[in-house]
Each structure stands twice: as C-alpha cells, then as structure tokens.
Amino acid sequence: MRKEIYTEKGATPVGPYSQAVVADGPLVFVSGQGPVDPVTGQMKLGSFAEQAEQVFENLKTLLEAAGTSWEHVVRVGIFLADMAYFAEMNGIYQRYLTKPYPARTTVQAGLPGGKMLIEVDCIAVVPQG
C-alpha cells in the first residue's frame, strides 16, 4: 500500500517524515482542515495542542469516510501560524502517524481568521478489497 523510499545519497529526515513514499492504489486528496468543531461548526480557539488535536481528528473522520485511515496516508502538508509550534506539532503528529512516515512539508503560513494556529491536508491510499 505505501512503501518508504530512502537513500543515503539524500538528506536524512530530521523529523517524523520519509524522504519519499510510493503508493499503490486509488488516492484520496483531503483538503486543508482547520480546528473546526464539526458539532458546532465553530473554530475551536484553544491552545495550540487543542487546535492541533481537533485538526487531526477532523482529518481522521474524513479519511474514514473515504474508506481509509492514517495508516495509509502517503503525504501530509502542515501549515503553522508560527514555527515555534513545530516541536509540539511533531509530538501530536506522532500520535496519529506511524512509521513508515508519510512524505511531509511543514511551513509557516498566514492562516484564515487570524486565530487559527494550524491547518493540515493529506493524501492517502484507499485500500482495495
């Protein structure tokens, strides 16, 4: 389903991500998700950890609705309001994603609403059978 690609000729990952990933099967592309509470439809404006956990739970719900899971994610894009949250984000990220880690990009970005601290999108394989 997903296979890590690693070469010593490339830069060694400095976090929980793979240099590259090969995927086998149909893909689902999940749009960027913010910390919106699906029950109230309101943005969850708490600590960074509270916002990040809501984001990862929102993604989990969408992955499951598409017939897949975090186990089959091959690419993640993370957008942080401030790179000071990077280490904290990695800790939360590792509760949802496991080795082989997906390929990943993490950038600092101006996020909508001015109070949103994190947005995440992903690409996953939909298992067949």
Image (cartoon, rainbow, N blue to C red):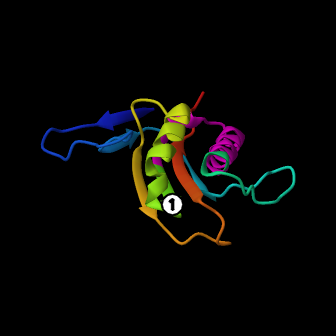
Q: Where is residue 49 in the image (x, y as percent from the top left)?
A: 61, 45
Front-most of residues 17 and 68: 17
Q: Quadrant of the C terminus?
A: top right
Write down the quadrant of residue 96 in the picture: top right
**At 32% across and 44% down in the image, what residue appears?**
20
Residue 109 appearing in the image: yes
Q: Name the residue under label 1.
A: 79
Q: Where is residue 79 in the image (x, y as percent from the top left)?
A: 51, 60
Whether the magenta-drawn stretch holds residue 67 is answered as yes
**At 49% across and 35% down in the image, what residue appears?**
94
Q: Where is residue 45 in the image (x, y as percent from the top left)?
A: 73, 57
Q: In this view, does 77 lie above or below 128?
A: below
Q: Where is residue 54 in the image (x, y as percent from the top left)?
A: 69, 46
- Left or right: residue 34 compared with residue 1: right
Front-most of residues 61 and 51: 51
Whether the magenta-drawn stretch holds residue 86 is answered as no
Write down the quadrant of residue 87 in the picture: top left
User: What segment carries the magenta color?
Assistant: 51-75
Q: Residues within 10 Å of mark 1 (few under 14, many from 20)?
A: many
User: Residue lying farthest right?
Assistant: 40
Residue 71 appearing in the image: no
Please tell me whether the stretch drawn in magenta is mainly helix, strand or loop.
Answer: helix
**At 49% across and 38% down in the image, what residue appears?**
91
Query: What amino acid type should be assigned to the residue bearing mark 1?
Result: Phe
Front-most of residues 107 and 31: 107
Q: Quadrant of the N terminus?
A: top left
User: Residue lying farthest left?
Assistant: 9
Label count reads: 1
Badge 1 element? strand
